[in-house]
Amino acid sequence: MTGEPVTDSDIRRDRARFIHGLPKAELHLHIEGTLEPEMMFALATRNGISLPYADVEAVRRAYVFDDLQSFLDVYYAGCAVLVTERDFYELTAAYLRRAAAQGVSHAEIFFDPQTHTDRGIPFDTVVTGICRALEDGQRRWSITWRLILCFLRHLSADAAMTTLEQALPFRNLIAAVGLDSSELGHPPSAFEAVFRRAREEGLLAVAHAGEEGPPEYIWEALEQLHVRRIDHGVRCWEDRLLVDRLLADRVPLTVCPLSNVKLGVFPDLAHHNLATLLRHGLRVTVNSDDPAYFGGYVADNMVAVAEALALDRGEIVQLARNSFLASFLDEAVKRERLSEVDHAATQGGWTAPQIPPARSSAG
Ligand code: ADE
Ligand code: ZN
């Protein structure tokens, strides 16, 4: 002990170190959303594709979004540079390297096959490239993984069924199906048949709901798609009966704070309802969604939200525990991972946050 006063910046640094050191599972991560501008340019050059941006800085400047759709337009355009199995391998390997540095020890990764098959890229190319990298990542970084196939909800239910059929030869590589893309006007109920078929094949289910869409979409995802988790789900707070249902069934919410601010779901992090949901007892997890577009990977999201909402140490540890509790890991492995969290939580130097929230966390 030097007797020097502890400054806010000491506390911030210790809290960030503590968060990075906690083992975490990432449960809401679109692999296509990890395409950093540098890689976008390198792949465009390699594949002879022209981009509507002069350079990497121009790409970053273009990442200002009004809402989910304005982001999706940019995100789908960026996917055009992904062509070969090597491209999908390198994209996934680059994510895993970053995830390891952020303390991720388990990743459940979304991919959007229709974004690629609709451009003539074979399903096989996409899934093989991603899975080879995941296997190498498990060997190199000890990051266990599950793969989740997302149907694009702005396309038809028939197109989703065709995609599921294309996926069945790779059934052993895929843990679950999900539902993403433009939420408003595309309710989960439209996809009931394809989710039923997926469940008959032994696949688990998740769905984006309650990001921009109303609480009714969360009800539909639960009742009609039989999902195990809700991706985002932050609008559940508008419906007390729904909150009670999520609590009673311990349905996890894979919340993505930086994404929610970038896409205008909340005006800023200080107004995010994550702390409210967590303190109410919901099984909230923190995730990065599309980190190359939203400015941070999973630990960055936790650090930002912990600071903006004055989460205490116990709440941060709860978020890390929730990430494994909400995962699709086997129960025995889950228990091991939870004890790793508890062990890491006893090691950190950070004792308590002294920094008041920037604003009240109401909402
Ligand atoms: N696809 C990629 N990111 C998404 C998000 N945040 N919501 C819906 N679809 C997505
Ligand atoms: Zn998402």
Image (tube, rainbow, N blue to C red):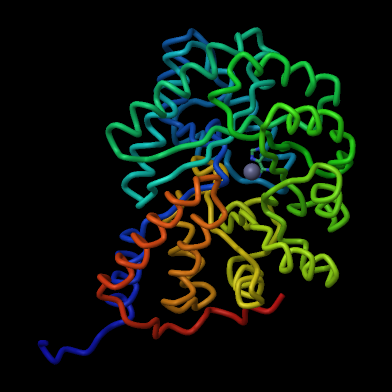
Answer with left or right where residue 182 lies relative to residue 140.
right
156 versus 333 height, above or below: above
**Which residue extends farthest left?**
2
Q: How many labels does the image show?
A: 0
Residue 159 at x, y percent in the picture: 81, 19
Quadrant of residue 152 in the image? Answer: top right
Quarter occupied by residue 348: bottom left
Q: Please give the name of the residue rendered at 74% of the width and 33% of the height, measured from the top-left corner.
A: 199
- Picture coordinates of residue 305, whole percent (x, y): 51, 66
Q: Residue at x 43, y 45 (%)?
A: 106
Question: In the orientation shown, which residue stands out farthest toward the front?
Answer: 332
Q: In this view, does 137 lie above or below 269?
A: above
* Nearest the eye: 66 or 141: 141
**If the image is split into quadrants, where does the N terminus sit?**
bottom left
Vertical arrangement, residue 59 with respect to residue 298, above or below = above
Q: Residue at x 77, y 54 (%)?
A: 210
